[in-house]
Amino acid sequence: MKKLLSHFLILIFICITQFAFSQPNGLHLGELAPDFTAINQDSTQINLHEMLKSGSVVLFFYRGEWCPYCNKQLKMFEDSLSFITQKGAKVIAISPEKHENIIKTIKKTNASYSVVSDENTSIMNAYKVNFELDSITKIKYKGYGIDLNDKNGSNGYNLPVPAVYIINKEGRITYRYFDTDYKKRASVQEIISHL
């Protein structure tokens, strides 16, 4: 009996450890932000390091136009954009959704800052925010009429933790908001206070 219990506890430990290591943990304060080049909603190529030459960048990740929490966040950034730009910063939003769904996001939120599709999840992976939905949540989303294979194309059921980073002109992360609960988001006031 003790041997069986011992094997059971070891199995539980292995499962918990694998789960913990498979979860995204994001980049941390002081780390160098990975450079990237992407196409925004206006079909303009943007490059992070080029944008940093003129000031800080507020970089945030969102799940898609189907997410009401994301739409609210994008709208809040748009409504407060002048306060961010007065601090000499620019905003970039990144999503796994296809370009045509980014256009839907723009229509819903009136976002005028750069919004980019992360093709092949390369940016989400570089910033360590990417994860794939588990099978139970995939079924639940499909029941809600949300087919992420349709929304995200080849990115499928990969989503980002809705993290926010402030990156200074030297390319270092000076602010990080990282919460795996997609219902919790950094306030724009808090972000502005760190610029």
Image: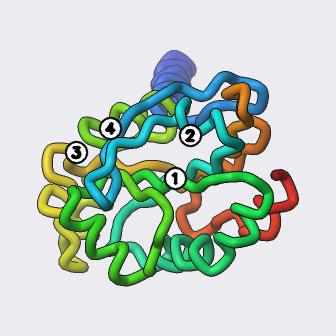
Q: Earlier in the sequence, mark 2 or mark 4?
A: 2
| Residue corresponding to mark 3 | 155
| Residue corresponding to mark 4 | 121
Question: Any mark on residue 51, and which?
Answer: 2
Q: Secondary structure at mark 4?
A: helix
25 sits to left or right of 12: right
Q: Secondary structure at mark 2?
A: helix
Q: Earlier in the sequence, mark 3 or mark 2?
A: 2
Marks 3/2: CA–CA distance:
26 Å
**Could you tell me the amino acid type at mark 3?**
Asn
Q: Secondary structure at mark 1?
A: strand
Q: Earlier in the sequence, mark 3 or mark 1?
A: 1
Marks 4 & 3, CB-CB < 8 Å contact = yes
Marks 3/1: CA–CA distance:
19 Å
Could you tell me if residue 1 is visible in this image? no
Crowding at mark 2 (Cα within 10 Å: few <14, some 14-19, many 20+) = some
User: Which residue appears at 53% of the width and 63% of the height?
Assistant: 182
Marks 4/3: CA–CA distance:
7 Å
